[in-house]
Each structure stands twice: as C-alpha cells, then as structure tokens.
Image (tube, grey):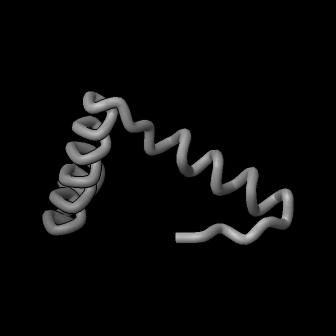
Amino acid sequence: MEISFSLGWVGAGYVFSIMLLAAASAALLGYCVGCTVYFWYKQLLAGRKIGF
C-alpha cells in the first residue's frame, strides 16, 4: 500500500487501503477473510466444486 503511494500509483494505493479497511472491519465483526480463502483453497485441492 505504501509502496503504491511512493511510486505515484495513487489509485492503486487507495484501492489497497479500502480493501484493508474492509478486511479489518469484517474481522471486527467476526468474519475471517483469510479463513474463507484457506477453505476455498482446501476445497480446490480436494477436487470439490465451490458453490457461490
């Protein structure tokens, strides 16, 4: 995030900042984004189809 701003990529820096804010807000509400990604990864390794 800070690298984006230092390189002059202001738009990318704001996008990363918003994504970080969303993930932190979700974590405060009890939802773990990393746990969900890990679950999807394990499902893909097991050969199961992920339903959205």
Residue at left 27%, top 53%? 19
Q: Position of residue 43 (x, y in %)?
A: 74, 57
Q: Is residue 23 visible?
A: yes
Residue at left 33%, top 33%? 27
Q: Position of residue 18 (x, y in %)?
A: 19, 53
Q: Nearer the viewer, residue 23 or 47?
A: 47
Q: Determine whether 5 is above or below 24 in the image.
A: below
Q: Is residue 6 visible?
A: no
Residue at left 16%, top 58%? 14
Residue 13: image quadrant is bottom left
Q: Determine whether 52 is above or below 31 in the image.
A: below
Q: Nearer the viewer, residue 7 or 44?
A: 44
Q: Position of residue 11 (x, y in %)?
A: 16, 68
Q: Nearer the viewer, residue 34 or 1?
A: 34
**Number of marks in the image?**
0
Image position of 37 (left or right of 8): right
- In the displayed orientation, state which residue is furthest to the right: 46
Image position of 10 (left or right of 32): left
Residue at left 75%, top 51%? 42
Q: Determine whether 28 is above or below 17 in the image.
A: above
Image position of 41 (left or right of 19): right
